[in-house]
Amino acid sequence: MKRFENRVAIITGAADGLGKAGALKLASEGASIVIWDLNEIKGLETAEEVRKLGVDVIFEKVNTAEYSEVEMATKNVIAKFGKIDILINNAGITRDSTLKKMTVEQWQLVIDVNLTGVFNCSRITSQHMLEAGYGRIINTSSVVGLYGNFGQVNYAATKAGVIGMTKTMGKELGRKGITVNAVAPGFIATDMVKKMPAEVIAKMEAIVPVARLGSPEDVASAYAYLASEEASYINGTVLSVDGGIVI
Ligand code: CAA
């Protein structure tokens, strides 16, 4: 029997990057997949790739920062699958700028998506996990939430905030059969990192003890582990997947 057979997993921001790798990983091990993302073109393409692995999949265009959109999308998941076993709060954005130059809009947008989006999805989908007495919530934090980063005061605040949310939700939901954990990726070779100035990427690579950027699949393996039965006694933790950059 595959690890995620009969499991239904919602993965936000799964049109591309880490979320897509997570969706393909869970699907390859039998999970039914729900992709919530703003990018309709890539979202539908990813859904097609997932379907080829022989599992059920739905894509819905959802802005996770909007409570009512998440509510509606959750209703659609319940109508199709009847339950939600796994939520991976992977959707996140950057609007990098030094504190001196950061606009209020850059600050607020990152808070809305990276923090309020995690609240909305967790608040709404956990109602169904509570009814079932089972759930796995995985929140995507970042190395930046652990040690800060030049040019990312907004992003760092959200990724540190996600860790506080993870620990609090783990305390509240653990006794109801739901575990909540965070993954803190380091510098992973996705479009988000590739947008960084080349000299900054080179500096990052030079300080990673395993001497390379991570791959989306490195992070997907951590998502899958925390979503699995094997991780049932792990709750409220932050798993760094960063090649040792925080050592
Ligand atoms: N450390 C120290 N100084 C730095 C620096 C750094 N990492 N980056 C820039 N500076 C310095 C410059 O040398 C320059 O110094 P001087 O003023 O003395 O010449 C100054 O900061 C430039 O400041 P500006 O306000 O003019 O900023 P800018 O317009 O050049 O942009 C920046 C600065 C926004 C930080 C830009 O360099 C940048 O985008 N850096 C990348 C930020 C980054 O690491 N993002 C991570 C994206 S990946 C991700 O987020 C995923 C994840 O979870 C890890």
Image: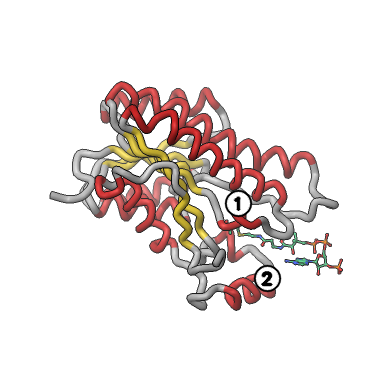
Q: Earlier in the sequence, mark 2 or mark 1?
A: 1
Checking the image for residue 63, the label placed there is: none
Query: Who's the residue at 53% across and 32% down the image?
Result: 119
Distance from disc 2 to disc 1, alpha carbons, whole Å, reads 18 Å
Disc 1 beta carbon < 8 A from ligand 1? yes
Pinpoint residue 86: horizontal percent, then vertical percent.
Answer: 34, 39
Report the amino acid beneath label 2: Val
Ligand 1: quadrant of the figure: bottom right
Secondary structure state at the residue bearing disc 2 = helix
User: Residue at label 2?
Assistant: 200
Is 173 placed left or right of 152 in the picture?
left
Residue furthest to the left? 1
Q: Residue at x 34, y 24 (%)?
A: 130
Please indicate, yes or no, whether residue 79 appears anywhere in the rendered image. Answer: yes
Q: Which residue is mark 1?
A: 145
The residue at 53%/62% (across/down) is 186
The C terminus sits in image quarter:
bottom right
Residue type pointed to by label 1:
Gly
Q: Position of residue 158 (x, y in %)?
A: 62, 43
Tell whether circle 2 marks a residue whose Cβ is less than 8 angstroms from ligand 1.
Answer: yes
Residue 139 at what x, y percent from top left? 47, 44
- The reply to whether residue 42 is visible in this rendering is no
Of residues 60 and 109, the one nearer the viewer is 109
